[in-house]
Amino acid sequence: MLKTFRGGIHPPYNKDLTKHKPVETAKLPDRVIIPMSQHVGAPCEPIVKVGDLVKKGQKIGEARAFVSAPIHASISGKVTAVEPRPHPGGGMVMSVVIESDGKDELFEGINAPKPLAELSPDEIKNLIRESGIVGMGGAGFPTQVKLSPPPGKTIDTIIVNGAECEPYLTADHRLMVERPDDVVLGLEAIMKATGVKNGYIAIEENKPDAIEAIRKAIQAKDGIELVELATKYPQGGEKQLINAVTGREVPSGGLPMDVHVIVDNAGTCAAIANAIKTGMPLVERIATVTGTAVNEPKNLLIRIGTPFSEIIEQCGGFKGEAGKVIMGGPMMGLAQSVLDVPAIKGTSGILVLAKNDVVLSEQSPCIRCARCVDACPIHLLPTTLGKFAERGMWTEAEEYHALDCIECGCCAYVCPAHIPLTQLIRLAKNHIMAAKKK
Amino acid sequence: MGEYKFITTSSPHIHSGESVQRIMFNVAGALMLPAAAGIYFFGLRALVLIIITTLAAVLTEAIFQKLRGKPITVWDGSAVVTGILLALNLPPGLPLWMAVVGAAIAISLGKQVYGGIGMNPFNPALIGRVFLMITFPVQMTTWINPVDGTTGATPLQIMKMQGVSTDYIKLFLGNIGGSLGETSAFMIILGGLYLLYKGYIEWRIPGFYLGTVAILSVVLGRDPIFELLSGGLMLGAFFMATDMVTSPISRLGKIIFGIGAGIFTVIIRFYGGYPEGVSFSILLMNAFTPVINRYTVPRIYGEVKVR
């Protein structure tokens, strides 16, 4: 039986554009723009200055806070600027700009550590931290912090998120097909670091080749199980995934560790495996470059900091008129206004929608059809929350659990009246949070 | 890559393509099935009644919106649905001008005074029907016998007055006296199944409504099959109680709504002065809908049960 959750939607997946295309290594960029904030938590402090020569893998941003992750140079070359630059997450963020010397030289400090069997849990956690590894599904939470629960919180289950439920994206899919052993090694490292005996790798059933590859890779492994999930959005949402795999519910306002679970993305596991095998910190990732307005959709292995413009150019540029450039998938991704923003650790994809595919419908009154109620994977009443938000009734919105909204977009996707419910609830959340801070 | 201006609206960036208009015209399309049965049994007169009533509803909506200085939105199809529904709830031989009055009342008093689509607490078609029942009680209870075109009684009236049941097959197919579109259970169920299949109605309201009537009929010693197939119950359960605007939004709320409508229908039919109680039952439950919504807020994912 396929595991799943209640609610959710079945959007057209459009993964055929790239799901059979092996990952291609992108050409070495001439220039990278590396933001000092690519994760949840405190931004890094740049530790290089203009004129410095840096090499691939060299640390250029120091993480001083606990909830943070250091940042490394993704190419070798000369630092030409340390200044605020446009960030794909919005706004201007302090960034280190490196002009390539074309040599792609490795930093001397990069050495393969001991094999996993000889590493202690603390050594693994330290390696993960020093390698700058963060959640690569998009949220970018520092992985080492997740693996270090506060005293009193016990973990008994690790889930690798290979659902990849966002339409269009196939980066995790290709990773699991092409490097299943890395995904498994990463999971083993997490299990060892946390002393947990139960590991699951959960994949939506629409990726049979990834399921097969992972099944083979875990054959001789103890304590690791494959979970086949129903294909439904947002199956890869952390809360939905935990519910589908374990039957547990993360308490409202709580974290997965409150139900003794840690969830890590398949890409994150592969990054951990890479660090264990080579000592290389996180300086590159697989991103799906796709959409109706890209000439040659691809899965590309890109260096962190490569500008979107260069990445799109390598995929044949725009096809026709591009209406929207999105970092991430179509349900939760962020629309970009300029193309000189760089790919960051959480850039799972770059989606370009043709102008004709961009939905800009006029809103009409709610007819209380309750489609949003049926679609909400948190079982909220989006229509009610939307009405509260429209009227500025923030207290009522909070009573109706606005803060539990995961902003998956299902409500707005199904709304026949084209009410921007997700946006309205996000607005309510912002107001409630702002009021709490006072 | 040149200067590009990109659209930067918020996520989600894709949409299901569903629209209010598509929902309304699908409902209108499904209503064509019972309408066709009505035309078959009661003749062209029925077709004229449907057309006139629908036109009157659409026109009233347009005039009202024009007077209020609002954009005219008759193309959303909601007034069409109200018009057809009202016609299906009228005696086939009703004078046309009365039907026009009913349609005008349905749209104006039933919908536009509350602010238009989505704002009305009561099903507009039923407001129109009840207005006509109160205003023109004789004409509204003059039924045509589909077999010979003479006036006669409905199966529910015959049951109430004489305690005589009607043949199930006739009830199911619809060659009996009654409102234009309520007599053919077969065609109504067909239309209802289409809407269920398309996801435009939800099974809980008709399911629990019909189930409650059936169970209470058995408990109270009546014939459940006769009760289900006669009167406006089928049409009401599939096409009026399921009206999105005026029924609850949560699953539990829909169940309560269906059960409540069933109880009221049985009370009015078995113990009330009227032979039929579907319209009043649905309107009563419409009135309860805000309260039901308030008390059936679903337990959310991860909600800790402390209260």
Image (spheres, rainbow, N blue to C red):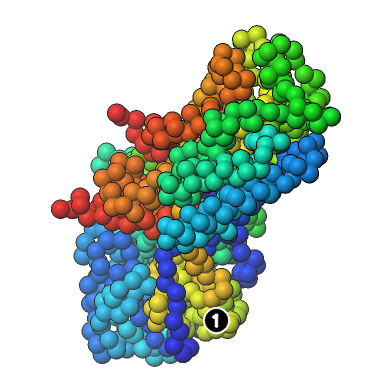
Q: Is residue A139 visible from the viewing direction of this image?
A: yes
Q: Is residue B37 visible from the viewing direction of this image?
A: no
Q: Quadrant of residue B242?
A: top right
Find the residue positioned furthest to the top: B221
The residue sitting at 48% across, 34% down in the picture is: B286
The residue sitting at 36% across, 53% down in the picture is: A425
Q: Relative to B39, is A372 on the left or the right?
A: left
The residue sitting at 74% across, 45% down in the picture is: B47
Q: Quadrant of residue A74?
A: bottom left
User: Tag 1, which chain?
Assistant: A
Q: Which residue is mark 1?
A: A321
Judging depth in this view, the residue of B177 and B5 nearest the camera is B177
Find the residue positioned furthest to the right: B148
Judging depth in this view, the residue of A349 and B193 nearest the camera is B193
B140 w.r.t. A97: above or below: above
Q: Position of residue A338 (x, y in %)?
A: 40, 80
Q: Quadrant of residue B82?
A: top right
Q: Relative to B140, is A266 on the left or the right?
A: left
Q: Secondary structure at mark 1?
A: loop
Q: Position of residue A51 (x, y in %)?
A: 26, 90
Q: Position of residue A217 (x, y in %)?
A: 59, 54
Judging depth in this view, the residue of B186 and A31 nearest the camera is B186
The quadrant of the image that shows the C terminus of chain B is top left
The residue sitting at 32% across, 83% down in the picture is: A97
Q: Relative to A324, is B232 on the left or the right?
A: right
Number of other residues with Cα within 10 Å of mark 1, as a class: few under 14, some 14 to 19, many 20 or more:
some
B90 w.r.t. A338: above or below: above
- Under mark 1, the amino acid is Glu
Q: Position of residue A401 (x, y in %)?
A: 34, 43
Judging depth in this view, the residue of B221 and B208 nearest the camera is B221
